[in-house]
Image: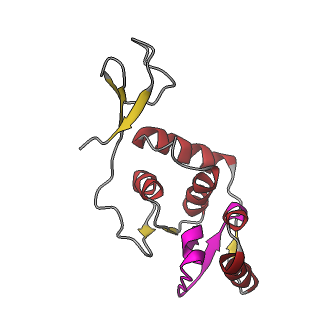
């Protein structure tokens, strides 16, 4: 089962075999991409709304990787659907791919190269320079803003 992100419909991706997506992906689409979603839904694509348990698991995985602040609600739902359906996420979104790796969910990229390695982002204070594993609104030491930092 391939679970399709918006990029699959934008790039007119035509997979063999069963597919699924989420209602939130449909809401992001316009014009021809929206038509392609509707056509696939009418041709047997499963439109799946994931449960809260899967959504919570995705949010926790995204916290672990440091991607929670960059994932949209649609991204979280897409990953949760892939987890529930034991599917492969079809996406070009790096953060989605990174969290999918943390979840053990397979990924297929469309127009971009897929990720080569998973990243667990760190967060650096813009004031005092201290680094933290978890994202926060402000540095607990000096109160300055934190910025996501490439761990490599």
Q: Which residues are magenta?
A: 1-24
Q: Is residue 127 above or below residue 61?
A: above
Q: Position of residue 75 (x, y in %)?
A: 58, 55
**Quarter the C terminus occupies:** top left
Figure quadrant of residue 142? top left
Q: Residue furthest left?
A: 152
Residue 4 can be seen, yes or no: no
Asked whether 11 falls inside the magenta stretch, the response is yes
| Horizontal relation, residue 122 to residue 34: left or right | left
Asked whether 133 falls inside the magenta stretch, the response is no
Q: Is residue 94 above or below residue 59?
A: below
Which residue is drawn at the image coordinates 74% and 79% (left, top)? 38
Q: Position of residue 36 (x, y in %)?
A: 67, 82
| Horizontal relation, residue 32 to residue 1: left or right | right
Q: Position of residue 124 (x, y in %)?
A: 34, 28
Figure quadrant of residue 127? top left
Residue 133 can be seen, yes or no: yes
**Quarter the N terminus occupies:** bottom right
Q: Nearer the viewer, residue 113 or 105?
A: 113
Which residue is drawn at the image coordinates 59% and 81% (left, top)? 18
Which residue is drawn at the image coordinates 51% and 46% (left, top)? 70
């Amino acid at each position: 089962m391939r679970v399709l992100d918006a990029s699959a419909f934008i790039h007119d991706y035509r997979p063999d075999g069963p597919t699924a997506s989420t209602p939130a992906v449909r809401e992001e689409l316009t014009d021809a991409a929206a038509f392609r979603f509707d056509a696939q839904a009418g041709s047997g694509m499963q439109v799946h709304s994931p449960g809260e348990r899967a959504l919570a698991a995705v949010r926790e995985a995204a916290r672990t990787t440091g991607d929670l602040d960059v994932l949209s609600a649609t991204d979280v739902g897409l990953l949760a659907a892939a987890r529930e359906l034991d599917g492969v996420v079809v996406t070009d979104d790096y953060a989605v791919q990174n969290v999918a790796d943390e979840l053990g969910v397979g990924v297929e990229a469309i127009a971009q190269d897929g990720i080569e390695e998973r990243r667990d982002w760190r967060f650096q204070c813009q004031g005092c320079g201290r680094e933290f594993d978890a994202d926060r609104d402000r540095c607990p030491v000096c109160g300055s803003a934190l910025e996501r930092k490439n761990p490599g």
